[in-house]
Image (cartoon, rainbow, N blue to C red):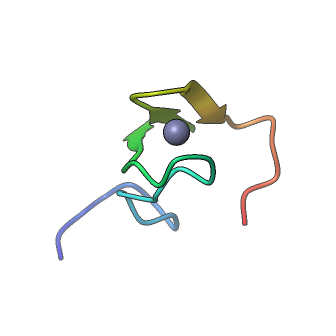
Amino acid sequence: MSDAEGTTPPGRPCPRCGETMVHRHCEYVCPQHGVIYDCADTFY
Ligand SMILES: [Zn+2]
């Protein structure tokens, strides 16, 4: 992999619907629900 997203891998599933979320800078955006996590939240 040559991904440069940082320590968090892209393509995480949405915890609500399982849809693959888009990792956009410090946010995760679900196509169904919008922003799920952002940099103010605790990343796990
Ligand atoms: Zn979702």
Q: Is residue 2 above or below residue 41?
A: below
Q: Residue at x 42, y 66 (%)?
A: 9
Judging depth in this view, the residue of 23 and 33 nearest the camera is 33
Residue 34, above or below 25: above
Count numbered badges in the picture.
Answer: 0
Q: Residue furthest front?
A: 17
* Quarter of the rendering occupied by the N terminus: bottom left
Q: Position of residue 40 (x, y in %)?
A: 80, 35
Residue 25 visible: no
User: Would residue 39 be found to the left or right of residue 34 on screen?
Assistant: right
Q: Residue at x 51, y 68 (%)?
A: 7
Residue sitting farthest toward the left: 2
Instruction: Kindly give the residue lying farthest to the bottom in the view shown.
Output: 1
Find residue 33 and report its horizontal and vertical position in percent.
Answer: 55, 26
Residue 27 image-quadrant placement: top right
| For residue 24, side relative to residue 26 (left or right) | left
